[in-house]
């Protein structure tokens, strides 16, 4: 049925092109277009031992909250997804043009919405490609995505961000060089007016990424450098400049896979990385250094077991600060105890999935441990540790 439906749409498109073209012979010579539809229908169950900071109606797990001992559980089917890849002849000498549209059908107990995940076009030449549109940020490195059952895919130890961008890749025999210019939309920087894309818009400068990816037999490794500027206060003619770097490696052979990533950077709240910046009473900006890393191993195909271990830390500011102010970033909790700030956190998760054709049925157990601190003159003080056990189970049908 899918082939028949696809063929019918292609035939209609070709007929329309024939009728609209001033030269019917040219229309007949145009190579055939096509598309593939894909997606999944997913149902999740979770149970956690205490209050947590999560998102997507508690399905996207992050870390234990600094207050509250209430255990909870829930079941949802709100991460159902659908997408389509479109193919057509290229232009400007490109061998092929590709388009992607991908959305998920999310919601909560009091809202329902359709969210655009990816939407881009791409021209592919023999040794290079040019992408225009919204997709994963290059620091996410989607080709070595961690194996997890939870939809967090290793966040907040792995940068998590999809943004509009112009990305150029040049492919050598085993090496790919990447350059990208990126602006925010869904994933936003923190600031005095809350999370907003306006801070980067006012800075004018795009987020710039440069990277290299080397593949040799079963091994992939790469490096990336990232620069982002934001303007938190429009009346102050200064920017917060953020410099970040990543290094990663991935090894796959037969049914075994091992991968890992290390990140060191500044002001990465739009990537779910703890840390940020501080504005003192003189409206001076002070950046915090952030560190994040994870290691991930998996084995199997029909029956797959996997383990993820991650650690992240807010390394503080380089300079000593002598005036009060406010911290903006990721890893802040505002509650009955006042504001609390994450010093560091780690996670260990162990999972199993059964993967027959078109299905994934699995279970995963997480242990998360986080240090919550108070803030005194921009320094993290009075640390208190909290931990949480979490169980996830999911059944996913792919089409």
Image (spheres, rainbow, N blue to C red):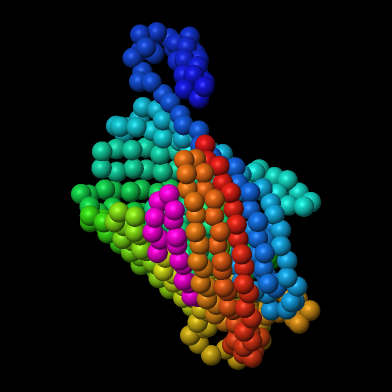
Q: Residue 266, how many percent across, how many down?
A: 49, 72
Residue positioned most to the left: 173
- In this rendering, does residue 118 appear at all? no
Q: Residue 10, how many percent across, how many down?
A: 46, 19
- Vertical placement of 361 versus 50: above or below? above
Given residues 25 and 218, the one toward you in this image is 218
Q: Residue 82, how many percent across, how many down?
A: 56, 39
Q: Residue 77, how many percent across, how many down?
A: 66, 48
Q: Quadrant of residue 125?
A: top left
**Is residue 299 located in the magenta-colored stretch of the structure?**
yes
- Vertical placement of 286 versus 297: above or below? below
- Vertical placement of 168 versus 334: above or below? above
Residue drawn at 27 percent across, 59 percent down: 219
Residue drawn at 56 percent across, 46 percent down: 396
Q: Is 391 positioned to the left or the right of 335 in the image?
A: left
Q: Quadrant of residue 279?
A: bottom right
Residue drawn at 34 percent across, 55 percent down: 255
> What secondary structure characterizes most of the magenta part?
strand
Given residues 350 and 60, the one toward you in this image is 350
Q: How many marks?
A: 0
Q: Quadrant of residue 382?
A: bottom right
Which residues fall within the magenta stretch?
Answer: 297-312
**Is residue 387 located in the magenta-colored stretch of the structure?**
no
- Vertical placement of 33 versus 269: above or below? above
Q: Is 34 positioned to the left or the right of 397 in the image?
A: left
Residue drawn at 49 percent across, 59 percent down: 352
Given residues 328 and 296, the one toward you in this image is 296
- In this rendering, does residue 302 appear at all? yes
């Amino acid at each position: 049925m899918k082939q028949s439906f696809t063929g019918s749409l292609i035939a209609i498109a070709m007929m329309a092109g024939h009728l609209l073209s001033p030269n019917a012979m040219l229309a007949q010579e145009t190579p055939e277009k096509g598309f593939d539809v894909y997606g999944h229908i997913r149902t999740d169950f979770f149970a956690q031992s205490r209050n947590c900071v999560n998102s997507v109606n508690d399905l996207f797990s992050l870390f234990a909250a600094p207050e509250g001992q209430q255990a909870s559980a829930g079941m949802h089917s709100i991460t159902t997804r659908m997408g389509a890849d479109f193919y057509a002849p290229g232009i400007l000498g490109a061998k092929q043009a590709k388009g992607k549209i991908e959305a998920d059908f999310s919601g909560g107990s009091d809202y329902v919405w359709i969210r655009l995940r990816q939407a881009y076009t791409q021209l592919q030449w023999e040794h290079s490609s040019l992408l225009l549109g919204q997709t994963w940020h290059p620091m996410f490195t989607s080709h070595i995505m961690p194996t997890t059952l939870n939809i967090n895919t290793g966040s907040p130890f792995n940068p998590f961000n999809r943004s509009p961008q112009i990305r150029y890749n040049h492919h050598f025999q085993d090496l790919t060089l990447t350059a990208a210019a990126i602006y925010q939309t869904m994933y936003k920087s923190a600031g005095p007016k809350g999370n907003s894309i306006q801070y980067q818009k006012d800075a004018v400068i795009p987020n710039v990424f440069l990277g290299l990816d080397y593949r040799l037999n079963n091994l992939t490794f790469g490096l990336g450098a990232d620069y982002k500027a934001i303007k938190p206060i429009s009346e102050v003619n200064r920017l917060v400049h953020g410099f970040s770097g990543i290094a990663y490696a991935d090894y796959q052979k037969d049914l075994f896979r091992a991968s890992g990533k290390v990140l060191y950077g500044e002001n990465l709240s739009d990537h779910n990385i703890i840390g940020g910046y501080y504005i003192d009473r003189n409206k001076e900006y002070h950046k915090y250094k952030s560190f994040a890393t994870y290691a991930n191993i998996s084995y199997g195909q029909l029956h797959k077991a996997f383990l993820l271990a991650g650690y992240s830390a807010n390394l503080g500011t380089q300079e000593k600060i002598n005036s009060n102010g406010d911290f903006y970033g990721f890893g802040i909790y505002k509650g009955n105890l006042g504001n609390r700030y994450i010093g560091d956190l780690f996670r260990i998760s162990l999972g199993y999935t059964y993967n027959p054709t078109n299905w994934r049925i699995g279970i995963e157990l997480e242990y998360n441990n986080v240090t919550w601190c108070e803030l005194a003159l921009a320094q993290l003080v009075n640390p208190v540790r909290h931990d949480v056990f979490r169980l996830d189970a999911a059944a996913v049908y792919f089409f």
